[in-house]
Image (cartoon, helix red, strand yellow):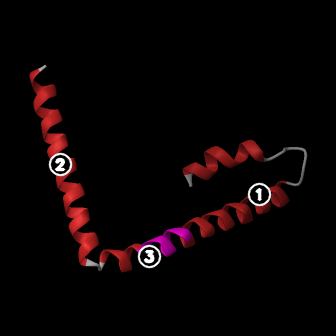
Amino acid sequence: MIFFAALLPQFVDAAGSMAHQVAILAVTSVTIEFCVLVGYGALAGRMMRLAAQPRFARLTKRVAGTMLIIAAVRIVFFAKG
């Protein structure tokens, strides 16, 4: 609500029909949000199938472990300096 209250009034012309302009902005916003959420859902479905494979799980664990080791090394070096 805060987002819409802060952002959308900038695109409404006070001389025009307020209801018409707000309706257009609302439909546009809902359409864009729907497309984004459908994309997230499709990506999650794909990732779920991929995550079920043992090879992907091993790769994910290795990447996560490597990132944790790198973070620990950086903490050690930055804590000293």
Q: How many marks?
A: 3
Q: CA distance from mark 3 to mark 2?
A: 26 Å
Residue placed at 16% from the left, 26% from the top? 78
Q: Residues within 10 Å of mark 1 (few under 14, many from 20)?
A: some
Q: Is residue 48 above or below residue 8?
A: below
Q: Is residue 38 above or below residue 19?
A: below
Dot 1 lies on which element? helix
Q: Which residue is mark 1?
A: 22
| Image: magenta residue range | 39-46
Residue 27, percent from left and from top: 73, 66
Per the rendering, the mark at residue 46 is: 3
Q: Residues within 10 Å of mark 3 (few under 14, many from 20)?
A: few
Q: Reading the chain from its start, which is encountered first: label 3 or label 2?
A: 3
The quadrant where residue 34 appears:
bottom right
Residue placed at 17% from the left, 48% from the top? 68
Residue placed at 31% from the left, 74% from the top? 51
Q: Is residue 53 left or right of residue 68?
A: right
The kind of residue tagged 2 is: Leu
Q: Is residue 27 left or right of residue 73?
A: right
Dot 2 lies on which element? helix
The kind of residue tagged 3 is: Arg
Q: Which residue is mark 2?
A: 68
